[in-house]
Image: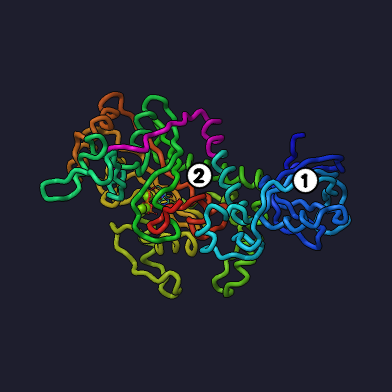
Amino acid sequence: MKHTKVKDLLNSTKPVDDVLIKGWVRTFRSNRFLAINDGSVIHNIQCVIDFENTSEETLKRLTTGAAVAIQGNLVESSGSGQQFEIQVTNLEILGDSDAEKYPMQPKKHTLEFLRENAHLRVRTNLFGAVMRVRSVLSFAVHHYFQDRGFAYVNTPIITGSDAEGAGEIFQVTSLPLNNIPKTEEGDVDYKQDFFGKETNLTVSGQLEAETFAMALGQVYTFGPTFRAENSNTSRHLAEFWMIEPEVAFNDLDANMDLAEDFIKYVIRYVLENCPEDLTFLNQRLKQEESQKKAADRSPMTLLEKLRFVLENNFKRVSYTEAIDILKNSKPNRNKKFNYIIEEWGADLQSEHERYLVEKHFKSPVILFDYPADIKAFYMRLNDDGKTVRAMDILFPGIGEIVGGSQREERLDVLQQKIKELDIDEKELWWYLDTRRYGSAPHSGFGLGFERLVQFVTGMSNIRDVIPFPRTPQNAEF
Ligand code: ATP
Ligand code: MG
Ligand code: MG
Ligand code: MG
């Protein structure tokens, strides 16, 4: 007999005779009421046991975490709290769970404790909800692009390029760790690493995606990227997933339109497809907010924030305007936004970004036309010779969620920039070919998938929206 998903049973409109479910015990009370979760939905299904006809031995083994198969009849529940429950006719314990040792007891655990148990935390309501939402969001990403004729490109994980030029790269080695060649000075000879070639884990698939866009027109990547971020923030991981569309013949304005439309689409998609999980996450955040001091409380609930994003245009502001706003602001009156106001040309700190988004505009913001000197080499230089056609999308509570640009399509301008930055042009011969043969304007962006999941789920730490977070202290499993 095939088992039925708890989600389907809870959505049933009428009683059903003889159903079989398989799942795990969440709680067992009064030797009668079993709460079973099978992961298909956040809610448990109540199963009522005929304890007089159940052996003492079986009752004892119904501990939190045990895997069970339950047969019975789905009937209207007389108790409050659920419409249906299962009257158990047959119960089989598939796997015991030691009540003394099982770490995921039904009580409130700290997020730190749960991080140490990343392999078990998905068994909690909170992480079950976050991970289901994450999964639906990734489906929505593919849905959006595939529906619009974009081709999905799998760009390489092992690569010779550092697209961002930030130097935050992980070297790759094919050699036994005890036999890495040394230079004459005794340092590790990285040049030998990948079968005689220097390579690293990708920091972005953009450069490779550009070459595909210049043939397939519209492409996107969605894969893991790696950055040796030796810092501990709530928004950085050493391994994160990035969504990178790249479109031939699109300028920066079209790029902004695409990013805004895309973000709204995926948020609408989860609102429609994850109502139970989002309701739970919304409640959780409400509770968390209610414990804060009134001044620190967010004026909107999670669901209100998501709807706000859907219903309002992102504010489009040039970097130069943003600097003026920051200079004329009085953020120092508010301790939270205590920072030094920068001069034109400086990169914005997250405090600046948060001020613009959360205090000044009270809306997602697209900042564009940044100083060339603080952005990567491939961005399209404006006619002023000082700024580039870059954009960052800033979100409340998150900061930068997207970094994108129109790409420099002019070979000579690009070569000049490469020279100025002391990058070895020979290493980019293949990239420059896109400018040599049939070059055309094109643009794209990178959206950090975990930051999107953070925004949608309201989780404040990025470590809590990826199954197994990689951070400087965390790579055990
Ligand atoms: P930040 O300023 O936050 O360090 P960045 O400007 O270095 O980000 P980009 O190179 O623009 O990042 O990458 C594109 C997007 O990837 C960012 O907008 C962000 O959403 C995401 N991202 C970048 N670095 C990380 C990271 N270490 N962990 C998670 N997401 C990241
Ligand atoms: Mg960075
Ligand atoms: Mg940045
Ligand atoms: Mg960026």
Amino acid at dot 1: Ile
Magenta run includes residue 155: yes
Q: Residue 97 occupies which quadrant of the picture?
A: bottom right
Image coords of residue 263 (percent x, y): 53, 45
Image coords of residue 239 (percent x, y): 41, 48
Look at the image and tell me whether residue 346 can be seen: yes
Give the magenta range.
141-162
For this view, does 251 lie left or right of residue 398?
A: left
Look at the image and tell me whether residue 397 can be seen: no
Q: Is residue 277 above or below residue 135?
A: below
Total tally of numbered discs in the picture: 2
Between 401 and 203, the one nearer to me in the picture: 203
* Mark 2 vs 1, N-terminal side: 1
Q: Which residue is mark 1?
A: 70
Magenta run includes residue 323: no
Between 277 and 21, the one nearer to me in the picture: 21
Image coords of residue 477 (percent x, y): 46, 51
Residue at the left extreme, as displayed? 184
The residue under the point 61% across, 45% down is: 270
Q: Secondary structure at mark 2?
A: helix
Q: Is residue 66 above or below residue 136?
A: below
